[in-house]
Image: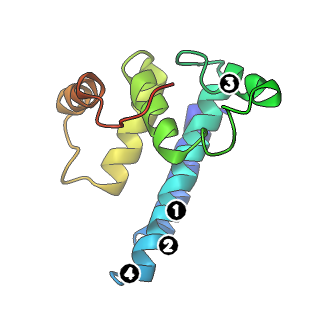
Amino acid sequence: MEIESVKKCILEIYKVWSVIGDCEDCFRYGEIHESFVVQIISNYCVGQGYEVEGFPIQKRIFEIINADYDEAYFCHDRYIKYLDVLATQHDDVFELMFFYSTTFWPEQFYDEELYRQRLLDYISCDIYGIEF
């Protein structure tokens, strides 16, 4: 999948996400749409062969022979950390993550350098609380 195709998918998901209401169920529905975006960008990264400490490609192989790598291991938060780390290492992933963030939350993410610094802060402080 090409970057422009991924961006197009993000925009399509955003169109639905942006009209979701403010109720509790709406919030959960919105989170589901955001997880679709994370999945699409992750699929792009896997297609490029990008890994962070073997995640997710090698870990999926280990899943077959090691019970430590079950579906709970492949959680949403670990994929978020994966994408954030990759965004600091690969320009294409940074482009996609910045596009996603500025599309969904333009008032919070409007400057590339501030966004890059925020990612580095998240990683250095390990806000995720999970290991690869």
Residue at image mark 4? 24
Residue at image mark 1? 33
23 relative to 80 in the view: left or right: left
Provide residue 40's location: percent of width, then percent of height: 60, 44
**Residues at marks 2 and 1, CA–CA distance in whole angstroms:** 7 Å
Q: In which quarter of the image is residue 110?
A: top left
Q: In which quarter of the image is residue 56?
A: top right
**Three-letter amino acid code of the residue under disc 4:** Glu
Q: Can residue 19 be seen in this view?
A: no
56 relative to 99 in the view: left or right: right
**Three-letter amino acid code of the residue under disc 2:** Tyr
73 relative to 116 in the view: left or right: right
**Residues at marks 3 and 1, CA–CA distance in whole angstroms:** 25 Å
Residue at image mark 3? 59
Q: Can residue 63 be seen in this view?
A: yes
Residue at image mark 2? 29
Secondary structure of the residue carrying tag 4 is helix
Provide residue 14's location: percent of width, then percent of height: 46, 61
Secondary structure of the residue carrying tag 3 is helix
| Label 1 with label 4: CB-CB less than 8 Å | no
Please say if 9 is above or below 48.
below
**Residues at marks 3 and 2, CA–CA distance in whole angstroms:** 29 Å
Instruction: Tell me the crowding category of disc 3: few under 14, some 14 to 19, or many 20 or more residues within 10 angstroms, Cα based.
Output: some
Q: Which of 118 and 24 is in front in this view?
A: 24
Dot in front, 4 or 3: 3
Instruction: Tell me the crowding category of disc 4: few under 14, some 14 to 19, or many 20 or more residues within 10 angstroms, Cα based.
Output: few
**Residues at marks 4 and 3, CA–CA distance in whole angstroms:** 34 Å
**Three-letter amino acid code of the residue under disc 1:** His
| Label 2 with label 1: CB-CB less than 8 Å | yes
Earlier residue among tags 3 and 1? 1
